[in-house]
Image (cartoon, rainbow, N blue to C red):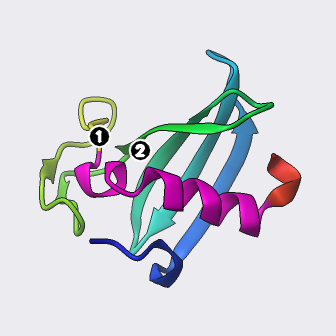
Amino acid sequence: MLVIKELPIEVITIYPSKSFDGIEILFRVNNHNYQFLIGNSKNPFPINVKHVFKEKAVCPFCKKKILAVPLGQQLCLEFQKNLPALLQYFQEKYPHAF
């Protein structure tokens, strides 16, 4: 199980979604990019985390072989198990975005 607070998370961008009412967060862990989708900007709830890899690689967390974007935008099953903790991490670290 991932311990979110112990991961070396680097935020790339946090922005309001253009396709739904919510927030999108692009972040990087160990040189691998991920996209976190959060629904409802007033009462945020986690939707999912997708891999956003620039080249084919194996996700260090879920161990899936991920193709480059756009084909490789698949859910990261390990982050999916930790969505509430990930949302809490970003809300505490970047309260201005919420």
| Residue type at the position of mark 2 | Val
Q: Which mark is residue 49?
A: 2
Where is residue 78 drawn, in percent x and y? 27, 57
**Disc 1 and disc 2 in contact, CB within 8 angstroms:** yes
Whether 42 is drawn above or below 2: the answer is above
Where is residue 62 drawn, in percent x and y? 19, 59
What residue occupies the far top of the structure in this picture? 19
Residue 88: quadrant of the picture: bottom right
Q: Which residue is at a point 80% across and 31% down the rendered structure image?
A: 42
Residue 23: quadrant of the picture: top right
Separation (CA) of disc 1 from disc 2: 6 Å
Indicate whether residue 51 is drawn in magenta.
no
Residue 53 as seen in the image, left or right of residue 58: right
Q: Give the range drawn in magenta.
A: 76-94
User: Label 2 neighbourhood size at 10 Å, few (<14), some (14-19), many (20+)?
Assistant: many
| Residue type at the position of mark 1 | Leu
Q: Residue 75 carries which label?
A: 1
Q: Earlier in the sequence, mark 1 or mark 2?
A: 2
Where is residue 2 drawn, in percent x and y? 33, 72
Whether 35 is drawn above or below 41: the answer is below
